[in-house]
Amino acid sequence: MSDHPTTVGEIMNPHVISCTSDTTLREAIDMLQQHRIHALVVVEGPGYLAGVFSQTDALRAWRQGLDYEQSMASPVGEFMTKSVITCMSHVDMTRAASMLTEHKIHRLVVVEERNDGRVWPVGVISQTDIVRQLSGMMLVER
């Protein structure tokens, strides 16, 4: 077993499934279903982070009293979570797990800061990724 702590970059999913804020709820929900995921990273411009659109956000959109067709045609930008909890790939997995617990969230968007000062999504780490890693570590120790 390695002496260095496992980093987020070692276990994150580097395949970011994303949409833009003008993607309709219908399109976003189709993407969630197609990729069998619970949230989409929302990007703007050339790809910087703008928010996250989750299944919870979709439910919130429907609760706002719009009729079905009207809500399905609405842009995800109206319902996405704009204040996204993020981390960088060099962060220790234990710290990432603490962030998930502390903020009562299921996933962190892994970002890198670019020259323009904006953050760009490079991956996603979820509770499932961390539990899978811990499970594998337990098997190695046995």
Image (cartoon, rainbow, N blue to C red):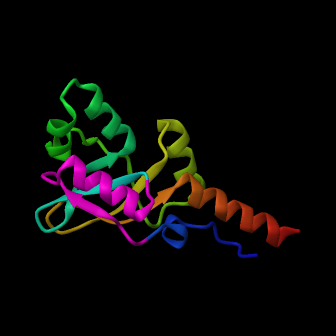
Question: Is residue 50 visible in this depiction of the protein?
Answer: no
Q: Position of residue 52 (x, y in %)?
A: 30, 49
**Is residue 19 rendered magenta in the image?**
yes
Residue at the right extreme, as displayed: 142
Q: Where is the N terminus found, in terms of image quarters?
A: bottom right
x%, y% of residue 37?
44, 57
Q: Is residue 78 above or below residue 125?
A: above
- Figure check: 139 above or below 50: below
Q: Is residue 37 above or below residue 70?
A: below
Q: In percent of the image, x 17 and y 39: which residue is there?
A: 69
Residue 56 can be seen, yes or no: yes
- Residue 53 located within the stretch drawn in magenta: no
Q: Residue at x 63, y 66 (%)?
A: 5
Q: Position of residue 122 (x, y in %)?
A: 34, 68
Residue that protrudes farthest toward the bottom in the picture: 2
**Which segment did they paint magenta?**
14-37
Apparent side of residue 71 relative to residue 31 in the rendered image (left or right): left
- Answer with the quarter of the image where residue 68 lies: top left
At x 40%, y 64%, the residue is: 35
Residue 94 vs residue 25, the one in the foreground: 25
